[in-house]
Amino acid sequence: MAKKQMLTAVESKKFIRQAVDTWESKLSVGATIFSGLSGQVYWHQSLGVWGHFYNGFTEGNYQGNYWNVFGRVPHRFRKNMIVEINPPGVGINTNVQGVVAVDADGDRWVLHQGRLHPSGVRITEEMFDAATSMERVSVQFSNSEVVDYYKVANIDAPAEILQTQMASYVGECSKVRVYYIAGEKAAQEEANVEAAEGASSPEKQGSYQVGPQGPKVVERRHADVWHALTKALDERQIKHSNARVGRHGPDLRTFGKSPILFEIKSDCTATDLQRGVGQLLLYEQLLGSTHRKILVIPGPPEDAMGKAIKYLGLGELHYRRKGRSIRFDCRDLSKLLS
């Protein structure tokens, strides 16, 4: 068996702070910035990952831990956190889920122990190990203690590489969460999608590059519908994901004997419908199992489009918007979920 790679923990308050500041700075490059979690949230649509950093407590005498959280759905951030990666503010604290360490080449890394806390489950390090193929590395502290961690991202790598590494680790954490929420089969389906997407570079979507307000407006409208749908599923005690399928797939999937894929669109233009249909059909194949497929759209499409959608075996869930309030037809929703 090959010897584990050994890194050296960074324990200086000053150098930890510098590392976290660089980490945040590089994750912010090219990001859409939202207000959230009492600060800023950096969202990378092409990678399907967001991050938030809180480190203001390191000013003054308080020696707390960082609170850095990451997810894959760019709204309702506190509810949709996937993983916390929290290095200590200073010194040694192996009870928190993060550390900054230096490798043999002098590069700084952020690492994570593997504990996750999805609703109703406490995923331990041993449970994480059982659900992933990732390998741990060892980190040595100044008191001679050695603890095994997962490498998350190289802080000294170019911003694009760091962002890709972050997205990969958050995706792995999402898969592990699914493993313990919905079972091994569902987690393997998620892995199939990640592998397929990883075979090609993510496509930049231009609609998220127009103007400083464009992305926020688009995401807010989408978020309103997404939240209303998850609320309806929760009320019916239907298990569901808290992230889209992969980086570019349908917005939501349910778990169980008759799983469903949902794709939300803010309009019923031909382009919106084409993208929605394509996402549902393509990602069902990538998942490798049969799902009911539902377009969530603001009213019925034009007649010919509606007939084509029905012919392809897709369902439609229509919604009405009043301000930021979203309403579904309860009878249609119940029928689709039955």
Image (cartoon, grey):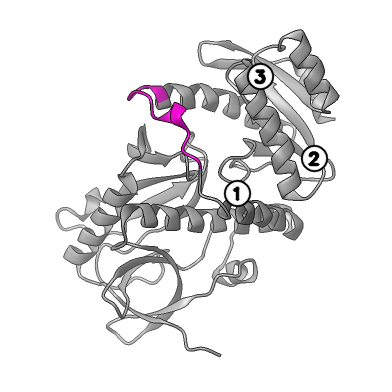
- Which quadrant of the view contains residue 195? bottom right
The question of residue 212 being in magenta is answered with yes
Q: Which residue is mark 2?
A: 291
**Hey, what amino acid is under mark 1?**
Ser
- Tell me if 183 is positioned left or right of 225 in this view: right
State the mark number for residue 119.
Answer: 1
State the mark number for residue 297.
Answer: 3
> CA–CA distance between discs 2 and 1?
24 Å
Q: Residue at x 37, y 33 (%)?
A: 34
Residue 189 picture location, percent across and down = 71, 53
Which of the two labelled residues, at mark 2 and mark 1, occupies the earlier sequence position?
1
Q: Which residues are magenta?
A: 203-214
Which of the two labelled residues, at mark 2 and mark 3, occupies the earlier sequence position?
2
Residue 239 visible from this viewpoint: no
Q: What quarter of the picture does the N terminus occupy?
A: bottom right
Q: Secondary structure at mark 2?
A: loop
